[in-house]
Image: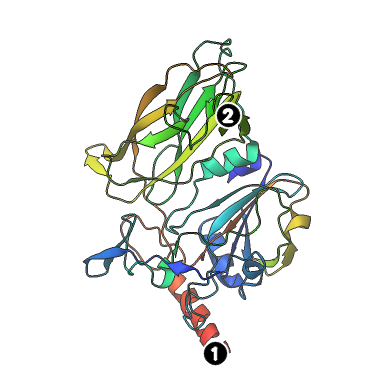
Amino acid sequence: MSDFEAAGAKLYVLSYDEVDALADYKKAHRASFTMLSDSDSEVIRSFGILNTTIAEDDHPWYGIPYPGVYVTNSEGIVTQKFFENNFTVRPGAEQLVAAVKGEEFTLAERPVTGEQVNVEIEFDGADLPIGITRQIVARFSVPEGMHLYQEPVPEGLVAASIELDGDVEGILPYTMIAPDTRPLTLGTDGHTLEVYEGNVILRLPIAQNGRAITKDDDGRWVTISGKVRWQACDSEACLLPEEESFNFRVPAAFTVMADMGPGEGRVPSMNGATHFKKMTDRRKTES
Amino acid sequence: MQIERDTRGAELAPNQYEDAEGYIAPLPAGSGPRSNPLGAFPTGPEVGERLPDVVAVDSDGVTLDLHEDREGKPVVLVFTRSAVW
């Protein structure tokens, strides 16, 4: 939370819960962000993100949104948004803070034209909980006059990408976060491709589903391995495709689950079951 | 737009259901809180658009207008299923 404050942003969390449930949550978790109650799902509907796969008479669940996150600039314009098909998965704080701050980095020195691209690969986060994303971050410094390609590319060219090794079980990639591109028409065959220039940062959100965890005396771990690939070109010619492997071993953190009851890794601190019953009863009475 | 539910998955054990990505939960994929959309689904305002007005009640029961309350600061607005479950 303090990371959001430090980035100069305000954090709001909206759900279809009643006010008293939010008050209990806030107290139990000492949350300092603003929680908003949309108990009739009016705001959710106005955004057009009511989960319509849930029937209106399915009382406990009807009214929830397709969960996601919007990030705005100081003018209130949406600059990034994060939605995934699997609702088990939520964007981690690191990528939200990066979205607020904007991405800037300086490598020691920008390579001169014709030299190799510099790349730094980092795991952004201290751990990898189940269902909450952290990111593999690849920072490329592309020489003046050169560019990298965005997928898709014709055969013979290699797009800039972050790929997990295929044999890693239980680590799942989500939607890549990439900077704006510029269209570039190739002189040779008239193909138009999207290219990245300058300092290029790719972020691949990843999460784990519980199957990647290994245990030893020091704790529970997950290992994330894969490759970053790229090929730099100027308007005339390309350098050879390059790749760099990464391998990160990080703690497999517990996820703080809903407070419906105790269980491994759970932190029951508010009586969720009571709120759940109240909310369900209200809906049954109303309809 | 008719949104289809993602019901792909398998029962591993009593109350242990796996979804298409291998996450395990007590309810089958596609039921109740696991009503995930298969394929495209609406995600609201697009990047570049102004965040629509959000007027809702906060945890103190006070009605709040997000664009007023943010006092000219950037915003991270999370839509979540529930703080309870």
In the rendered image, residue A122, in percent from the top left (x then y), is placed at: 45, 29
In what element is the residue under mark 1?
helix
Coloration mode: rainbow
Q: In the picture, residue B19 is in which quadrant?
A: bottom left
In the rendered image, residue A196, in percent from the top left (x then y), is placed at: 58, 29
Q: Is residue A125 left or right of residue B60?
A: left
In the rendered image, residue A247, in percent from the top left (x then y), is placed at: 33, 29
Q: Name the residue located 48 percent from the left edge and 67 percent from the top edge.
A: B84
Mark 2 sits on what residue? A196
Mark 1 sits on what residue? A285
Q: Is residue A118 left or right of residue A43?
A: left
In what element is the residue under mark 2?
strand
Q: Is residue A151 left or right of residue A6?
A: left
Q: Residues within 10 Å of mark 1 (few under 14, many from 20)?
A: few
| Discs 2 and 1 share one subunit | yes
Q: In the picture, residue A106 is in which quadrant?
A: top right
Residue A181 in view = yes
Vertical relation: B38 (above or below) A153: below
Q: Is residue A11 left or right of residue A167?
A: right
Vertical relation: A11 (above or below) B41: above
Q: CA distance from mark 2 to mark 1?
A: 56 Å
